[in-house]
Image (cartoon, coloured by chain):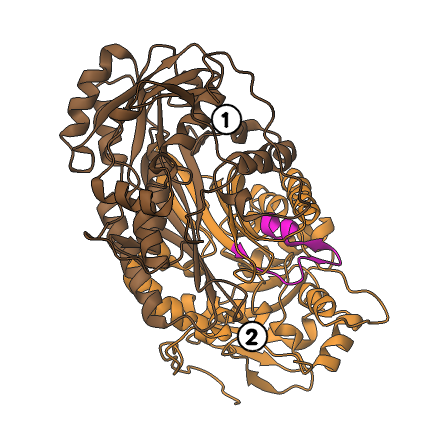
Chain colours: A brown, B orange
């Protein structure tokens, strides 16, 4: 499907099935359909309508960011982290992506009867360490226990509240044609780390999740006066899905240079083996930043000076096309990089 | 176990098992053990240490209440409500119990593959109606889908943010000896309504859940100048558990008049049949208020003038005993009303 420009996008489908499918949770087209056709009409739009990682709200004179996320990762423990690390960093990162300084987190556990208490201790201890690292306080919580076979060991929901500094406006609607698209480092490590444990795969070098807290780096970018138009962490659906969401919500196009996107040899090898495209594999400590061309070099230098974004690069630019992401391939071709319908299925499934 | 006074309370146990038990989620002693021995040490206390339904926090000059709750009710739909109604009212009520005016809610869904989309539509539509009724805005959300057998159709997590008016301090630590203990109406209807559907029981009159939003009534009490010391909604573990928690956290005793606690004949009949004590059965629209004796009559009159608390009554008073709830029975006896270890098991199980 090679297209050049101005492709009309249709409303996302909900699928033909009358029941919830795994693909409805995959961060792709079916998920967008679920949001557009079930959640948004019922919830009236409002702050939800801005469809950013966090809602930005006024309350009692303060400008707050508010976000929530559920964590259902299987396995619970993987190289480089666990469900507790993810639950803290993921929510902190969603706040950071709205330009907020994360302040408080709530934690909800849904535990399956029979979960070893030692696993729970380990998860809670990771959350504590991650919260300290990210400079947030865990202030309120809830625990529910369900019977065997009614949940998958341990689900965690975290919600977060942060403070958005005056004047900061970071959202897809702020993206402009000509903006440079920056990426904070190599992609695909988190998804492959999780998959390799789940499927019992061994690679030559162990692949560790990239999960990391992003708020301190975002704060530095803002403090140094970089005019950040939009930020997005590259979780479910990976880089390709994040760029598609932003392009659709901004009603603009993005041109992406395939050769500019860093992927480690280990991840590339694993992806080839599994039949996955690293552009769609989930990350937990990578983000993309949209900044005016004039600020791009300075933003890159700041990113590269932070431990979590040493490998930051420029990967593309925003163009005047409606909602389309075009990939300029290594071989010099052009193809539309689309939303998948759900998640990619590895060949072994 | 008849005790009079000054019983020393031991640290709550975690149980002998090395795995999570159903009773760890029942709102009783094992749950308290889980919180005291796993969550509190890791999360450092702080706002979490106050152990109220919401954390009260300062952010950007505003005084916020922040709370989270997970909903795993089975069945999803029951007389008088569904999981969506509960998820909104429950979180709104937790904010109200800290004296906050609820403002914003986040919603997280964990959906099991195969859930009928029509069920999801119905749940979302109940949430919309409940949010409108309670005057809160659903501003941000998240959805995860897990495979068949990895969850029980639909779990909902809601978190809420509200504004606490200046000067309002509502918490167990504010309870004083001599305070009157008020109850907003009859107890036990929610738990019996849910159980009757789950177990396929038919009673002569259908018992409807009491679920209702409490924030407007709390706001009126505060606006009318009632000096509210503590509030608690009577969810998991019912009235008896709520009073035990408050007594323990306030390090005071509570004397409760059994004959003063309203229970409908239908609930009483169902409880007798099932072998349950209505004082421990969950409610979703009932709360207890601790106010100085001088404000008690006025508070009761205000409560009785609200549709959701027409049957409000005085049920007891706070005494100078450490952490103990004593029940004065219908027959004139006295017995300690203890925390259960988990939830009550109906005879039919």
Q: Is residue B88 inside the magenta stretch?
A: yes
Quarter of the figure with residue B297: bottom right
Is B300 rendered above or below residue A179? below
Question: How far from the left and from the top, in percent, is residue B205?
Answer: 85, 67
Q: Chain of mark 1?
A: A
Quarter of the figure with residue A109: bottom left
Q: Residue furthest left?
A: A305
Is A213 or A177 nearer to us in this picture?
A: A177
Question: How far from the left and from the top, in percent, is residue A163?
Answer: 35, 33
Question: How far from the left and from the top, in percent, is residue A206?
Answer: 21, 53
Give the residue displayed 74% in from the left and 49% down from the top: B307
Give SS at disc 2: loop
Is A298 or A206 nearer to us in this picture?
A: A206
Q: Chain of mark 2?
A: B
Q: Is residue A277 inside the magenta stretch?
A: no
Q: Is residue B35 left or right of residue A29?
A: left
Is A62 or A66 nearer to us in this picture?
A: A66
Residue assigned mark 2: B343
Q: Which residues are magenta?
A: B70-89
Question: How far from the left and from the top, in percent, is residue B173?
Answer: 41, 60
Is A210 rendered above or below residue B286? above
The tag on residue A50 is: 1
Q: Residue furthest bottom?
A: B1
Q: Is residue B33 left or right of residue A180?
A: right
Q: Is residue A48 left or right of residue A189?
A: right
Quarter of the figure with residue B286: bottom right
Figure quadrant of the C terminus of chain B: bottom right
């Amino acid at each position: 499907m090679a297209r050049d420009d101005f492709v009309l996008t249709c409303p996302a489908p909900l699928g033909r099935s009358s029941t919830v499918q795994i693909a409805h949770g995959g961060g792709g087209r079916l998920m967008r359909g679920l949001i557009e056709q079930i959640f948004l009409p019922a919830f009236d739009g409002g702050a939800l309508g801005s469809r950013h990682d966090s809602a930005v709200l006024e309350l009692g004179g303060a400008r707050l960011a508010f976000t929530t996320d559920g964590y259902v990762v299987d396995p619970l423990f993987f190289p480089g982290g666990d469900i507790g690390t993810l639950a803290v960093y993921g929510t902190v990162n969603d706040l950071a992506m709205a330009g907020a300084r994360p302040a408080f987190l709530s934690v909800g556990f849904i535990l399956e009867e029979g979960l070893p208490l030692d696993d729970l201790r380990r998860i809670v201890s990771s959350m504590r360490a991650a919260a300290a690292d990210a400079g947030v306080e865990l202030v309120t919580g809830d625990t529910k226990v369900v019977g065997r076979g009614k949940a998958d060991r341990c689900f965690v929901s975290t919600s977060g509240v942060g403070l958005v500094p005056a004047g900061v406006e970071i959202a897809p609607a702020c993206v402009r044609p000509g903006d440079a698209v920056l990426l904070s480092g190599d992609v695909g490590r988190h998804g492959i780390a999780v998959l390799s444990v789940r499927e019992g795969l061994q690679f030559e070098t162990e692949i560790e999740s990239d999960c990391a807290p992003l708020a301190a780096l975002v704060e530095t970018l803002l403090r140094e006066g970089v005019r950040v138009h939009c930020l997005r962490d590259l979780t479910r659906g990976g880089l390709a899905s994040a760029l598609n969401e932003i392009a659709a919500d901004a009603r603009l196009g993005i041109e992406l240079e395939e050769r500019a996107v860093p992927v480690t040899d280990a991840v590339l090898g694993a992806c080839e083996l599994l039949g996955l495209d690293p552009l769609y594999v989930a990350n937990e400590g990578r983000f993309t930043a949209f900044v005016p061309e004039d600020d791009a070099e300075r933003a890159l230098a700041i990113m590269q000076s932070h431990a979590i974004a040493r490998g930051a690069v420029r990967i593309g630019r925003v163009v005047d096309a409606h909602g389309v992401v075009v990939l300029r391939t290594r071989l010099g071709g052009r193809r539309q990089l689309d939303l998948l319908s759900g998640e990619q299925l590895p060949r072994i499934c």
